Amino acid sequence: MDITQRLQECVIQPQQKDKIEGFRSILQDILTSTPTGSSQVQNLKGYVECVLDEQVGLVVARQLLSEFIVLFDDRIEDNDVKKQLLTFAIDKAQPRAVSFEEQLSQLREKLAKAYEAEEEFLEAARVLQGIQLDSGHRTISDEYKLGIYIRIVRLLLEVDEAVMADAYLNRAALLIPNSSDFETALLFKLCQARILDAKRKFIEAATKYHELSYVPEVHQDERIQCLTCAVQCTVLAGAGPQRSRLLATLYKDERTHQLPSFSILEKTYMDRVIRPHEIAEFFATLQPHHRAKLADGTTVFDRAIREHNLLSASKIYNNITFDELAALLNISAEKAEEIASHMISENRMVGSIDQLEKLISFASGGAAINERNEDSSIASAAAAAANGTTQTSRRIEPSMLEISKWDSAIQTLCHDIDGIITAIHEKYPDYVPTNNFEMMG
């Protein structure tokens, strides 16, 4: 008697115990006696179709289908065969989804794993999206939902589907506060960083990556990768005070000194002009979405480097013509003026533009719009500490900038004189008391 006839007899078998034993016996024969190949696949498909026949009781069908799913862990190893059988089983069970919700979830997880093994990440994500997680017919734990959401997000990010991934990350965000699984929380934070990176929110992404690089439970190689991503995102971020603060944090981190990208990090932090050959070396290390073209035909990296070099020029020159700036940035004079005007209007650089003279005038400090902000200027922090003064966040208007510079110069001069007197007193303790009035005169 062939396999098909035996399956039909099992379907109409009235005794449940005999029915279960009969199906199990047939499945074992298919796996051991039938030659591996198309004939075995066809027999297994026939087995699934008979198990899901409406004449087979629901309790029996669920049990047999669950036992069939277990085969994909060790008995069925060929990936193409897995995909064929799992897809077939899902298609057959889907019309009765309410009755086989748990089994369908398991089938979809197995199929997604098979697609993932062949790096078909988008297909794997689509399969997982079909899992019913808001069912009223079975109890689904928040941990399981969170795990599926995180897995979908990671798969979508592999194919740069940041918008779809963000939607599922938002769902996961509602469940993460109740999760006690440390690994899941780490994966959630990593997905957050990658989505922020993909959405070009580089400052926020760099901050997340840098936080992850300090987590001791993360493998050393992965921590270094997070640190590298933090450096990349910081360099790609738009020039301004926030970026300057993050650059200072990364530059002080001794681990970054061992990275291949440290040279460009150092130049960015020191406000030095970055040359074309250095740009090419760093560009080769960037991710594909970092190299994507913008509406004007440039990349995010091109924009970041131009803004950085413009900010560097503002700290070298008092003023510069449009043509000279265009030559420095390797762009047209009109584009150079446009970039400068945007940075000035967004308070990322202090200066003014004279269109009649075709001249850009820079105020001292370039992007220093908050004088004595403790995070934006290491020098001002050191000076305040030396003088025993406290720093306050105070916006300096362009009209008051020269007066502020003059005050700062007087303060620095007085501090230097005080330092000289102190040094003389330490070396010649008898000289200062006797000549103090003469020195002051």
Image (cartoon, helix red, strand yellow):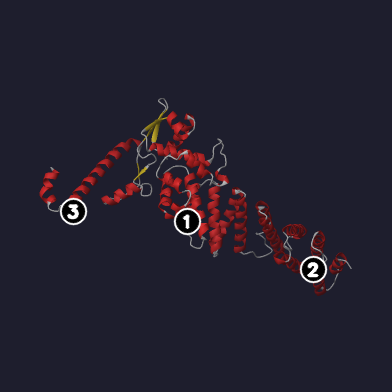
Position of the N terminus, as image quadrant, is bottom right
Q: Residues within 10 Å of mark 3 (few under 14, many from 20)?
A: few
Position of the C terminus, as image quadrant, is top left
Question: Which label number is shown at residue 7?
Answer: none
Q: Are marks 3 and 2 in contact (CB under 8 Å)?
A: no
Residue type at mark 1 is: Glu
SS state under label 3 = helix
- One can see residue 208 in this view: no
Residue type at mark 3 is: Glu
Q: How many marks?
A: 3
Residue 423 pos. (x, y %): 20, 50
Which residue position is annotated with label 1? 211
Question: Which label number is shown at residue 426?
Answer: 3
Q: Residue furthest front?
A: 277
Q: Earlier in the sequence, mark 1 or mark 3?
A: 1
Front label number (1 vs 2)? 2
121 lies left or right of 302: right
Q: Residues within 10 Å of mark 2 (few under 14, many from 20)?
A: few
Q: Are marks 1 and 2 in contact (CB under 8 Å)?
A: no
Q: Earlier in the sequence, mark 3 or mark 2?
A: 2
* CA gap, disc 1 and disc 2: 53 Å
SS state under label 1 = helix
Looking at this view, is 399 or 8 the one in front?
8
- One can see residue 240 in this view: yes
* CA gap, disc 3 and disc 2: 95 Å
Q: Earlier in the sequence, mark 1 or mark 2?
A: 2
Which residue position is annotated with label 2? 32
180 lies left or right of 392: right
Q: Residue furthest left?
A: 434
33, above or below 315, in the image: below
